[in-house]
Image: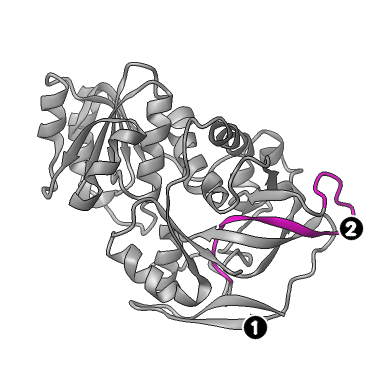
Amino acid sequence: MMRALVLEKPGRPPVLAVKETPIPSPGPGEVLVEVEACGFCHHDLLVMAGVLRRGVKPGVILGHEISGTVVQPGEGVTTIATGDRVVSLLTNACGRCERCRSGREHRCIYGEGIGHGRDGGFAEYVALSEFSLVKLPEDVDLTGAALLACPMGVALQAVQNVAEVRPGETTVVIGAGGGLGVHGLQMAAVLGSRVLAVTTSEDKLGRFASLGAEEILHTDELDFSEMVLALTEDEGAEVVFDTVGSVLFSSSWRSLAQFGRLVLLGEVAGKAVELNLAEIIFRDARILGSSGVSRAVIEQVVDMVSQGQVVPAVGGAMPLEEAATAFDLLTGRSIFGRLVLTGR
C-alpha cells in the first residue's frame, strides 16, 4: 500500500485527505516510479476548487509535475532501468502515433493527462509509460527536477517555439513571480531578450534581477501598458508573455510593439475577454496560445539546468498531509516560483 492525496470534495477550500491506496502495478511498457516530488500547479488548484472539471477522471490522484526514481520496469521496457532518476512528461503518451513521432507528444492521440485522466504524482508511487519519462543526470537535483517539464519546459516552449523570442527583443513577463512567470523570465533572458518583469507582489521585487530581469514593474493597477511604453521609447514590447490571462488581457496587448506577439498560457478556466479587432489588425500583432511541452524541449531544459543556465525556482516543499495549507498559499499568491509536494 502507499499514501496518496485524495480530493474528496472540490471547493474553496477543497476537502482533501491522505489515504492508503494500492501501489499501482506497471503494465507492459510501463514503469513504476517512487515519487521524489510533484509540483503543485495552478491546474491542480483549479481542479481542487471545482473550477476545472472537463476531462477529469473521478477520483483521480492529481499532480503532473513528477520527479522520482524507477523501482520497477514493466514487461517489454527497454529504455528505462531500475535506479534511473527521471522526470515525467505531462501526458502519458503512447510514443507510436503520428503526433508522438513528430515531436508533439503533449498532444498524443491516445494519451492520458497525468493527474487528470490518469493517476498522477501526489502519491508515493506512480506508474507511467516508459516513453513518458526522461532520464536525468546525477548533477540535477531530484526535488527541483519536478519542475523541469512544467513549469520550466512549458515556459521554454512558449518563448522559444511559439513566440520565437529573438536576441535584442524586449519581452514583458506578466505574473513574473509565479511558476510559469519566473521560469519564462529566465528562458527569455537566456535567449538574449531584454526582460521586463511585471508583478503585483511587493515582497517578490528583490528576486527578479538575479534571474535576468532588466526592469521590474511593480503595479497594483490593471493597466501597466503605459509603464511598458515608457521603458521602450513608446515602441512597446516585441513579446508579451502573459501567464495571468483575462483580467490583464487588454493591458497585455496594449503593451505590444508593431508586429508584436502576445503569447497566452496559464489561465485554463475558460474566461472570456473583449477584443478590439481593429487595434490588433492595425498593430499587425499576433495572439498565440501555448500549452504543454514536447519531450525534446524537456530534454533541452534538463541540459540548461545541468549547465547552470537556468534554475528551478522551488518555493517550498511540503508533505502530502499539508496540501490544504499549500492550497491556501497558492490561492494567496504568496509563493515565489512553484511549491512541490513530497510523499516521502
In this picture, residue 77 sits left or right of residue 166 = right
Residue type at mark 1 is Glu
| Circle number at residue 75 | 2
Which x, y percent locates residue 231? 15, 25
Q: Which residue is mark 1?
A: 20
Quadrant housing the C terminus: bottom right
Mark sitting on residue 164? none
Q: Quadrant of the N terminus?
A: bottom right
In magenta, the rendered stretch is 61-81
Question: What colour scheme has been applied to the protein in the rendered image?
Answer: one colour
The percent coordinates of residue 256 (x first, y second) are 23, 28
* N-terminal label among 2 and 1: 1
User: Is residue 334 rendered to the left or right of residue 327?
Assistant: left
Query: In which image quadrant can residue 46 be found?
Result: bottom left
Q: Are marks 2 and 1 in contact (CB under 8 Å)?
A: no
Q: Vertically, is 196 above or below 243?
A: above
Q: Residue at x 82, y 63 (%)?
A: 27
Mark in the foreground, 2 or 1:
1
- Tag 2: residue type? Glu
In terms of image quadrants, where is residue 43? bottom left
